[in-house]
Image: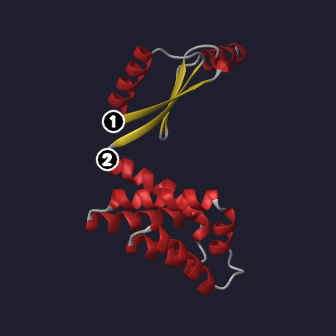
């Protein structure tokens, strides 16, 4: 099974438990803290995710960290299960999918808008409103500047790509001219 499929399953399971006990936002925060700690302390991450180390030793190390961080029993169980299955190496992917699921639950979409130049606040608001209308959900917009676009914008929301860049329009004209 691929890591993405496994990460989705763990994320869905954690969200299901969180919705049952009303602590799904807390679990997301704990997931963020744990992954951030693993990124900050690569030796710790290696010690708990490397299958060359004995499972019980990995659990003891985790318990020591858990005792100091005050993580919930549900989150501790998730980590212990992932240690048992030698899958703690995909905890970052679990976090990513968990946040995607939280966004879906909140009817929230994240858009990446790339423009050739810095956009005014009015332009960003207009793009956001258009994307909200197109997706039927609230949209959080992340802006990026790429001078290679020449002009216009490219907006990505999930699988939806709206390309209004001059670069793409020129490429289309060129293609049509070459066809004859």
Report the side of 22 relative to 175 (left or right).
left
Mark 2 to mark 1: distance in Å?
A: 9 Å
Above or below, 139 against 178 in this view is below
**Quick check: marks 2 and 1 in contact, CB under 8 Å?**
yes
Between residue 154 and residue 177, name the one nearer to us.
154
Q: Callout 2: few (<14), some (14-19), or many (20+) C-alpha neighbours within 10 Å? A: few
SS of the residue under disc 1: strand
Between residue 85 and residue 33, name the one nearer to us.
33
SS of the residue under disc 2: loop
Q: Callout 1: few (<14), some (14-19), or many (20+) C-alpha neighbours within 10 Å? A: some
Q: Which mark is residue 106?
A: 2
Between residue 5 and residue 147, name the one nearer to us.
147
Give the percent coordinates (x, y) of residue 151.
Answer: 59, 13
The structure residue drawn at horizontal position 29% and vertical position 63%, both measured from the top left corner, is: 19
Query: Which quarter of the figure is the C terminus placed in?
Result: top right
Residue 110: which quarter of the image?
A: top left
The structure residue drawn at horizontal position 57% and vertical position 82%, both measured from the top left corner, is: 60
Q: Tag 1 or tag 2, which sits nearer the N-term? A: 2
Q: Is the image coloured rainbow, by chain, by secondary structure, or in one colour?
A: secondary structure
Query: Which quarter of the figure is the N terminus placed in?
Result: bottom right
Can residue 85 be seen here? The reply is: no
């Amino acid at each position: 099974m691929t890591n993405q499929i496994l990460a989705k399953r763990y994320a869905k399971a954690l969200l299901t438990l969180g919705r049952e006990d009303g602590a799904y936002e807390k679990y997301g925060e704990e997931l963020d803290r744990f992954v951030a700690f693993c990124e900050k302390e690569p030796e710790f991450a290696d010690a708990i995710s490397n299958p060359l180390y004995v499972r019980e030793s990995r659990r003891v190390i985790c318990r020591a960290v858990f005792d100091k961080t005050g993580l919930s029993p549900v989150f501790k169980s998730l980590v212990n299960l992932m240690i048992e299955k030698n899958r703690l190496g995909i905890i970052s992917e679990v976090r990513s999918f968990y946040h995607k699921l939280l966004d879906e639950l909140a009817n929230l979409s994240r858009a990446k808008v790339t423009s050739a130049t810095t956009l005014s606040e009015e332009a960003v608001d207009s793009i956001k409103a258009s994307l909200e209308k197109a997706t039927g959900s609230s949209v959080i917009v992340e802006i990026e500047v790429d001078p290679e676009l020449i002009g216009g914008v490219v907006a990505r929301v999930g699988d939806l790509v709206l390309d209004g860049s001059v670069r793409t329009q020129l490429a289309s004209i060129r293609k049509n001219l070459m066809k004859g």
